[in-house]
Amino acid sequence: MASLVRVIDDHGSRHSDRAACVVGTDRRTYGALADQILRFASALRELGLQPGDRLALYLPNSVEYVVCFYGAMRAGLIATPINGAFTKAEVTYLLSDSGAAGIVSTPELLDRIGITGTEVAPEPGPRVVINTGESAPPWCSLTELLDTPAGSLPAPRDDSPACLPYSSGTTGRSKGIVHTHDSMAMQAVLSANRLQLRHDDVLVQAMPLVHLYPGNIIMGGLFVAGATMVVQPVFDPPAFADLLSQQRATACAGVPTTYAMLGQLPKQQVAELDTARLEIAFSAGAPLPGSIRSSFRGMFGADVLDCYGITEAAGNLVANLRYGGRPELSCGVPYPLTDVRIVDPLDQDVPDGEVGELIARGPQIMTGYWNRPEATAEALRGGWFHTGDLARRDERGFYFIVDRKNDLILTGGYNVYPAEIEDVLQAHPDVAMCAVFGIPDEIKGEKPWAAVVPRAGAELDEAILDAHCRGQLAAYKVPRYFVIVDELPRSSVGKILRRELRATFTPKENS
């Protein structure tokens, strides 16, 4: 299997003037991108970094991130993406756990983590510091590195490690996830196939590229197709809508909150935009409520396709087709070359319609967790990756994500799935966004709570929401408390963080 860098090289030779990526006002053609990737890779080797060394990329959304991500892999290094929103403590842990030999960052972010222009990080921190700003010894200037002539580099082995993203840490400290050139490339190729990306697609997104949904499913898939990726550096709903019109976008990508916020824009404002070329929108990260899908489709004229992926798979395992019908709330059917099962706690298949854990195997699955053999053996037991996500399959073979195992609420002996309740709440016309989570209870074990953000100008109270839920849910599923909030805690990619809501509202004596 060819690596993603070879794919970019091929487009750089055959379609050198075609736009590869646009971030803000910065633009690169495939020809320029391929050239800068090779220049950066050559410079890394000149700096003494060797194949297998980890290069931390602590960067915001930028063309520089794209160049450094693929440049590190082209040099045989292991690209280690770190979210630009992370604090010093979070970054320090990731640098230490990965054993990063080098780091690429901005002056502002380097200052945040205590790396100044007069000293490098203390041992055992990175020995090579590459700065996107002015040159200041002992820093290296990225600008100067990209101006140096490219050397000749052997291609890295397809089965060698290429990328070390970290998990979100919902069950403890974040774990490094080892992906090879082959698993990264296979995910991108399979995504281009299943999402049916075309060379004339122009896709707009605003998620942090350090996450493999935007950074490999979308970016890698688009580059395989020879298409164009447009990135809004930081998500701003009105400007995002304008960007769809300005770029004459054929597609966009986001998470459910992306589409919820776009659906709340003034209808007149959206009606004045030219989004006639917008054919499709992709959603992942959480189940997409039907009401959010319908609102977006009504305003922008494009359907939203739900996908399901996980970092350990370098992206997606299941997705809907761009063309053709699909059941509401389904995340689709398995990717090509990917086997998916729904199993009970003994790893036995459950009948169609029943809920179990989704497990999978395929060429896009990780080789393991970084320096965690026991966790690797547990996750990959029996040759199948155990996702920890609860799902069901219908008789037609479509999959439906029910919830995370860790978000499942156990109340009075019943299983309560937050996503099911959220879908009901989201359908209320005065609800902008919501999240359901479990709070410890001495008698029931847990009780479901709901945090609700009202639509602008709407008045909501507990009685209204309770009545709405009781008309559509069994009594044990109805939240015991409804908390009206101005906003919900979200990750940098836009996923709602139920664990933060649990921590906020759990009584201290139970925490």
Image: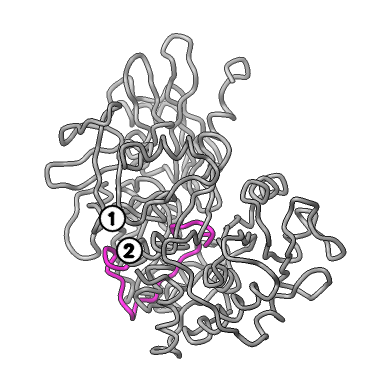
Q: Range of the magenta residues?
A: 191-213
Give the residue type that dot 1 points to: Ala
Which residue sits at x=45%, y=44%? 433
Q: In this view, does 356 lie above or below 19?
A: above
* Residue named by callout 1: 319
* Residue named by callout 2: 191
Q: Is residue 269 visible?
A: no
Q: Position of residue 466 (x, y in %)?
A: 38, 27
In-image side of 182 versus 331 (left or right)? right
Depth order, front residue of 74/354: 74
In-image side of 457 versus 135 (left or right)? left
Q: Is mark 1 on a helix, strand or loop?
A: strand
Q: Residue 194 is drawn in which quadrant? A: bottom left
Depth order, front residue of 348/276: 348
Callouts 1 and 2 close, C-beta under 8 Å = yes
Which residue sits at x=50%, y=62%? 162
Q: Where is residue 35 in the image (x, y as percent from the top left)?
A: 54, 84
Q: How crowded is mark 1: few (under 14 residues within 10 Å), some or many (20 or more)?
A: many
